[in-house]
Amino acid sequence: MKDSAPEKKPEPVLSARGLVKRYGHVTAIDGADFELLPGEVLAVIGDNGAGKTSLIKALTGALVPDAGEIRLHGEPIRFSGPLEARRHGIETVYQDLAVAPSMDIAANMFLGREIRRAGPLGTVFRMLDKKAMRRESADYMAALQIRLGSLGQAVETLSGGQRQAVAVARAAAWARSVVVMDEPTAALGVKESAQVLDLIRRVRDKGIPVILISHNMPHVFEIADRIHVHRLGRREALIKPADYSMAEVVAIMTGALSVTADGGTVVSDDEAASAAGVRRG
Amino acid sequence: MTASTMTPTAVKEPTAARRLLTAPAAGPFAALVLASVFFSLSTDQFLSGGNFSLILQQVMVVGTLAIGQTLIILTAGIDLACGAIMAFGGILLAKLAVNSGVPPVLAILLAIAVCGGFGLVNGLLVRLVPLPPFIVTLGMLNIAFALTHIYSDEQTVTGLPGPLTALGKTFPLGRTDVTYGSLLTVGLFLVFAYALNGTAWGRHVYALGNSAESARLSGIRVTRLTIGIYTVAGLVYGVAALLLVSRTGVGDPQAGQTENLDSITAVVLGGTSLFGGRGTVLGTFVGVLIVGVFRNGLQLMGVSSVYQTLVTGVLVILAVTVDQLSRKGTR
């Protein structure tokens, strides 16, 4: 895609306008806009305290905004909690990995969504259909090319990257609309990070757009189709990684540079821009 | 989740033998077998159906309490009040039937329901305030203990009607007489083994014990689950109260004072982790039997009861040590 060419924009999968969330005197979200297009990996970046987490929480139902509008597939929507967002096909991979370490992989894949046996065994005796859950877990692992050995092994026997893979596979398996990943590579080594980034690509290639919250600029530049730069509780810029250098993006994030309407940048903080080495002209 | 047609190339299941060896209760079970072999060789009376039936009778009350205790420990909680709740249930049961003229079966149901009520209150306090389970059940231990003594007026209740002691009656199993109470206890263990291993509820109990927050984020209704677990444990303590009364034939306000720690001992010996999320109710059954077999065997060998307690203490520390070391191995 050439950014200069006039594009006919597809309808966003998930979008928001003018979101506000205040806690007493603290404004966590200050009129933020948001837009996620079909089939893209959208990175959400921002300095600590910029309000990324609050924004993501609002989009995934973990907090209810005071004002503003969220749309899913073009329809206005209000989530009363994370479960409702999940019911609408938005799955989140949390930073601290919402997996149960002592339980096996298949049990984790289906945690909270267990399949019961057909007939009276299931309805009267509430018996789990463990075979079906193993089989479908295996199918999903295969579809995402995740190789973990036995699905009957406890998650705690896996490495950090493999655990992350389980969490991502679970989200991808259940997500119909969006997968949200909060710092998925933060705790991982170089090789494992690369594998998780690959996995994110495969999720996107399955047609599920991914929101990636990350601090890691190289990862963001490697995988994101677009970057949402969050600053002071609102969207500072929505850019393509090809159009800017990493240093410029960091400068936008910290407020040293501002993005103009035509996509250029202007220095908004002389000193900071010099320090960041992005002062032009 | 829709099934794709890709072949699960990455999946290989562990063999039956390996699963048996790595089962959480394998260590305790081996200890139980070793102890049984040792006592069979040491004394003539140990290895007999009658003696095993006796062991079962001796452990059925604490065993039943240990079922409820297992549920709560699996959630990373602990219940210090189980014995006291049971004692109150026992006195309530006996006094309702003997002094208040309540039909025996109704008295049984009422007592079990009241024990469930204690569990419900525990669960509400643990989840909704929230308070640490240790504190809640420590408080409830004292409350139930005091209520038992106030309500009973320190009097033992005798002259219980038939239905209250029916579980103490025996039936022949081969050439051995087994009490109905033992059978009920074993039945309860099987029911909860199935519930924990075969149903979504059981998986949610383990998930809750792993991490309440993760369980919540996985869509499990954690509040309802926690309160439910404590309530079910309370109901199980009510059944233990009935077993206690049927075994002793009286309503005794002094009963149940050491059973809270005894039940924790059994749970720990059975390989359940006090940190929650790991363990099985069948392991607890094995743990209960270990305590029972050691007490019985040492008694048959003529060792005084103080040494039985000493051995139990050593076993507990040993069991937790093994648990810690094996957990280090898997991480």
Image (cartoon, helix red, strand yellow):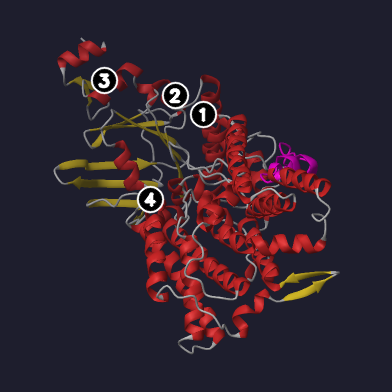
Question: Nearer the N terminus, badge 1 or badge 2?
Answer: 1
Question: Which mark, by number, is residue A208?
Answer: none
Residue at the image point whose x is 48% and y is 66% from the top: B254
Q: Position of residue A279 (x, y in %)?
A: 22, 12
* Above-or-below relation of B46 to A47: below
Taking the image as shown, residue A263 lies to the left or right of residue A83, namely left
The answer to whether dots 3 and 4 both sit on one chain is: no
Q: Position of residue B320 (x, y in %)?
A: 58, 39
Taking the image as shown, residue A32 lies to the left or right of residue A80, namely left
Please report, as a chain letter, where disc 2 is located: A
SS at badge 4: loop
Question: Which mark, by number, is residue A219?
Answer: 2
Q: Tell me which amino acid carries mark 2.
A: His
Residue of label 1:
A197
Extreme left residue here?
A25
Is residue B52 within the magenta segment? no
